Amino acid sequence: MKITHNGKRYNTDRVTVVAHRDCYSHSNNYSGTVYIGVAEDGTMLKWADTNGQDCWFTNYVEVIERPDSDILDDYDMDDDEEEDAKELGLITEV
């Protein structure tokens, strides 16, 4: 998906995904995934890729204007996403 924000064009296919969360409908059917990613200029994006199983959950993409320190809480990370998040300074391993 693409979004234009402050005159810059972002494409979710070209950002570094640092976390994701699978979403399910009320009947527990997989309905899509919400992603958090970082563009080359450091802008954080959040977007959903849905499959139509939940009529209230639709595709979207937005810029995260002021990311909080807990922005990645409640999101899953695979090994590659975790490494990218560390390199970008978004998380610290303890």
Image (spheres, rainbow, N blue to C red):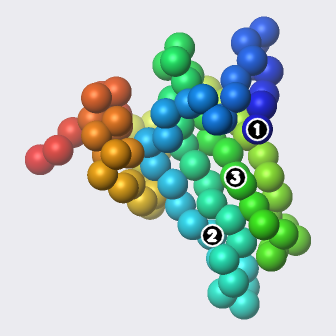
* Amino acid at dot 3: Ala
Numbered-mark total: 3
Element at label 2: strand
**75 sits to left or right of 94:** right
Q: Residue at x 34, y 36 (%)?
A: 84
**55 sits to left or right of 92:** right
- Labels 2, 1: front one: 1
Q: Which residue carries the number 2 mark?
A: 23
Label 1, residues with CA under 10 Å away: few <14, some 14-19, many ≥20? few
Q: Residue at x 72, y 79 (%)?
A: 25
Q: Residue furthest bottom?
A: 27
Marked residue nearer the N-terminal end (3 or 1): 1
**35 sits to left or right of 19:** right
* Amino acid at dot 1: Met
Element at label 3: strand
Label 3, residues with CA under 10 Å away: few <14, some 14-19, many ≥20? many
On residue 1, the disc is 1
Marked residue nearer the N-terminal end (3 or 2): 2
On residue 48, the disc is 3
Report, in whole angstroms, how far the alpha carbon at label 3 lies from the one at label 1.
9 Å
Q: Residue at x 49, y 33 (%)?
A: 16
Q: Badges 3 and 2: C-beta atoms under 8 Å apart? A: yes
Question: Which x, y percent locates residue 59?
Answer: 80, 52
Element at label 1: loop
* Amino acid at dot 2: Cys
Q: Residue furthest left?
A: 94
From this view, report whether residue 81 is shown above or below residue 27. above
Question: Residue 81 occupies which quadrant of the picture?
Answer: top left
User: Can the viewer see residue 67 in this picture?
Assistant: no
